[in-house]
Image: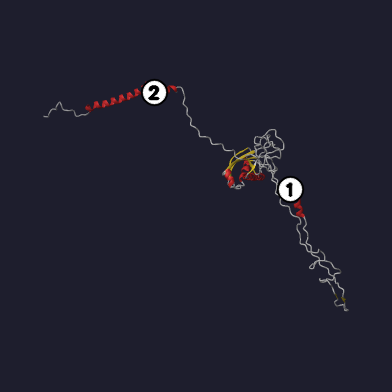
Amino acid sequence: MSPSPRPDAPARSGSPVQEPANRSIAIGFICTLLFHILLLCLAPLFPVEKFAGSHSNLDWVAKANRGKEFNFELTPPEPEPKQPDPFKFVETNPDAPENTPDKTNNYSNRNQQSAQKEKPPETDPENRPSVKGQDDIKNDSSIVSGDMARPQDGAAVTAMQNALENATPQAAQQARAEQVPLQGTEKIDGKSEDGVGSNISQSQSPSNQAEKFLEGAKNGKSPTGGLTESPQVEESRPKPKARPRLTQARPNILQNRLAGTQNIGILGIDARWSEYGEYMQEFIEIVQASWYSILDESRIAPKSGTHVFVTFTLNSDGEVSIVTTEETAGKQGVYACTNALTVRQPYRKWTEQMIAVLGKQQTMTFSFYYQ
C-alpha cells in the first residue's frame, strides 16, 4: 500500500509564495512616477520667493532699484593714433627756380614753391596753383605738360661748337733757309776756267752762293717760310665746357583747378626734394616711354576718350606686381598699360634710406588716358 500524503506538507511550487513581493515593487514605482508628474504640474503655483533663500534685510535694495535697467558695455581699447598722411609725389615745373618751401607734405625731384602768374579767384587749401585742364581727368599731381622731344643745348653754345668743328686747322710752317752770298775784300781768281776761286769772307756761315744775304734758320731747307719752324695747331681757341641739358616736362593731361595760390611768379608747386622723388620721376618717365613704344608697335588703337587705372605694388627690389585694373579701353588698352609697367622690371633697387622711410613696398595707382 502506498502511504497517503500528509495534509501539512508544503507545496513544491514557488510561485504562490513570491507573488506579494513583486506586487509591492510595482505599486511603489507607479506612485513615485505619479508624484513627480503632479509636482511638475503644481510647481508654477508655488511661491518661489520662499525657496530662493532671499534675505529680508536686502528687500530695500530690490525696492530701490525696481523699474531701473542695468546696462554694461565692454570698454573698447583706445584707438591708435592716426598715422600722418604719406608724402605725396608731385611733378614740378622744370622752368621754375628751385626754392625750398616752408611747409609741405609733397615730395619731388627738386625743391620748389607754389606760385602762378595771376591772382586766383579763390585760394586752394593745399596751396596748389591754378591749372587749366579737363574736368573729367583725375590728375592733381601735375601742373605742366611737355612733349617727348629731346632737350636741346642753348643756341649760343651750339653755334660756337659748330664753328670750332668746321674750322680749318692751321698748317705747319717750315723754317726758311739762311741765304749767305760769297763776300769778302780779297778776291783770288785763277786763269783756268776749271779752277776754284776764293774770297776772304767775314761770315761765320758757309756760303750757299746766294745773290744777297737773307736772314733765316741755319738748318732751314725751304727757300720760303718763316724765321722759325712752327708746329701744326689744330684749334687755337679754347673749347667751351659741356653745358648740362635742360630738363623737359613730360606729356601730361592736366586736371582743371580754379583755386590757386596767392604767390605771384613763375608757375610752381610746393615740393621738397627727396631721393624717392628722383626715383619716382625716373620710374614714371620709363613707364610712359614704354607705353608709347607698345602703342606704336600695336596695330589696334583703343578708342579715344577711354582710360585704364592700374593699381600695383612696387617693392624695394624694383619689382612690380599688378593688383587691380579699372578700365573702359578694353583688353588691348589694359594690355598696353600693364605691360608698360612690367616690361622693364626690375627697376632700380631702393637705397637703405628709402627703405627706412617707405618700408619694403608701396602701393600706388597709375592712370592712363587714351586721347
Kindly state the secondary structure of the residue where label 2 is placed.
Answer: helix
Residue 365: x and y, percent?
Answer: 61, 40
Three-letter code for the amino acid on which mark 1 is drawn: Gly
- Label 2 environment density (alpha carbons within 10 Å; few <14, some 14–19, many ≥20): few
Instruction: Please give the residue where the numbered disc 2 appears in the rendered image.
Output: 57
Three-letter code for the amino acid on which mark 2 is drawn: Asn
Which numbered marker is on residue 75? none
Q: Residue furthest left?
A: 1
Seen in the picture, residue 33 relative to 366 is either above or below; the reply is above
Q: Is residue 150 visible?
A: no
* Quarter of the figure with the C terminus: top right
Seen in the picture, residue 227 relative to 286 is either above or below; the reply is below
Residue 146: x and y, percent?
Answer: 70, 42
Nearer to the camera, 135 or 94: 94
Q: Residue at x 42, y 22 (%)?
A: 60
Kindly state the secondary structure of the residue where label 1 is placed.
Answer: loop
Q: How many marks?
A: 2
- Label 1 environment density (alpha carbons within 10 Å; few <14, some 14–19, many ≥20): few
Instruction: Please give the residue where the numbered disc 1 appears in the rendered image.
Output: 154
In the image: residue 104, left or right of residue 44: right
Q: Residue furthest right?
A: 191
Q: Is residue 162 visible?
A: yes
Disc on the earlier residue, 2 or 1? 2
Q: Residue at x 31, y 25 (%)?
A: 32
Q: Residue at x 39, y 23 (%)?
A: 57
Q: How many angstroms separate mark 2 from mark 1 (CA)? A: 103 Å
Residue 52: x and y, percent?
Answer: 37, 25
Nearer to the camera, 235 or 13: 235
